[in-house]
Image (spheres, rainbow, N blue to C red):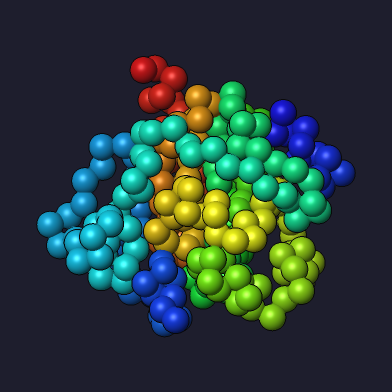
Amino acid sequence: MLRALIASVFAVGLAASGCAEEPASVGEDAATGFYRPGATAPASADLSRGDVPRDEYGRPYTYEGLGAPLPEFSGETTDQTSFSSSLLEGRWTVIEVWGIWCHDSRRDATYAAALSRALAQDPDVDFMSIHTPHNADSTHRALRGYDSVSAWFDEKGWEFLTVVDEDASIREALKIRWTPTYLLVAPDLTVQGFRTGLADAGDDAVKTFVQDIALTRADWDTD
């Protein structure tokens, strides 16, 4: 059903929020990998925020919902088509949660576009995104000068299925601790993988992520 919908759709503390307006730090223990259920953080992880273990830049080493059902959400896409997370059932899906307001998301944009193109070659994996503000109090800054999310895509010259989270309610429901966040959702709607931005992981990040997805799918199918 998601493929059909895609066809119809396309026939102030930012650091505390999970985004920083400064150069990314990529040290030895940087949380720039792909994490599956059961993953553990290194002893150097920062636990001071009281939510999830993080690296020195603030990136999480894990996602609270790994291995659990994806929280239900619904909203409108960039062309005002209704969308429900129930449409994801029965297929593998990568969800990017991002925001134009976020420096890290803007740095990741070309990687996200490349990932969407790479996954388009696989008939069994879909890609979509959720554009979200930092929180309900910062919706007026979510677009960073753009008239709409569609205007951003028009400028960049690409587009993929995107749900617009107007008030951060989807972000809150999904317990997103970093922007951008990528979630790998299995056909049974459980979250089987998580990672933060691709830009900080090097030039082969998209290729490596696609390989991680393939390995996760293979292991899941044999369980």
- Residue 193 position by quadrant: top left
Left or right side of 1 for 187: left
Question: Which residue is the extreme one toward the left?
Answer: 43
On screen, residue 55 above or below 219? below
Q: Which residue is at 51% across, 68% downward?
A: 134
Question: Which residue is the extreme one toward the top?
Answer: 222
Q: Which residue is at 64% across, 60% downward?
A: 166
Q: Which residue is at 81% across, 53% downward?
A: 79
On screen, residue 132 above or below 14? above
Q: Is residue 161 visible to the viewer in this orientation of the structure? A: yes
Left or right side of 126 for 46: left
**Figure disc tally:** 0
- Residue 143 position by quadrant: bottom right
Q: Is residue 116 visible to the viewer in this orientation of the structure? A: no
Quarter placement of the N terminus:
top right
Comparing 135 with 27, the one in front is: 135
Left or right side of 5 for 85: left
Q: Position of residue 82 (x, y in %)?
A: 75, 43
Comparing 204 with 217, the one in front is: 217
Quarter placement of the C terminus:
top left
Q: Which residue is at 31% across, 50% downward?
A: 62
Question: Which residue is the extreme one toward the front?
Answer: 137
Q: Position of residue 119 (x, y in %)?
A: 61, 42
Q: Position of residue 117 (x, y in %)?
A: 66, 49
Q: Position of residue 24 (x, y in %)?
A: 38, 75
On screen, residue 47 above or below 63? below
Comparing 181 with 111, the one in front is: 181
On screen, residue 199 above or below 94? below
Comparing 64 with 125, the one in front is: 64
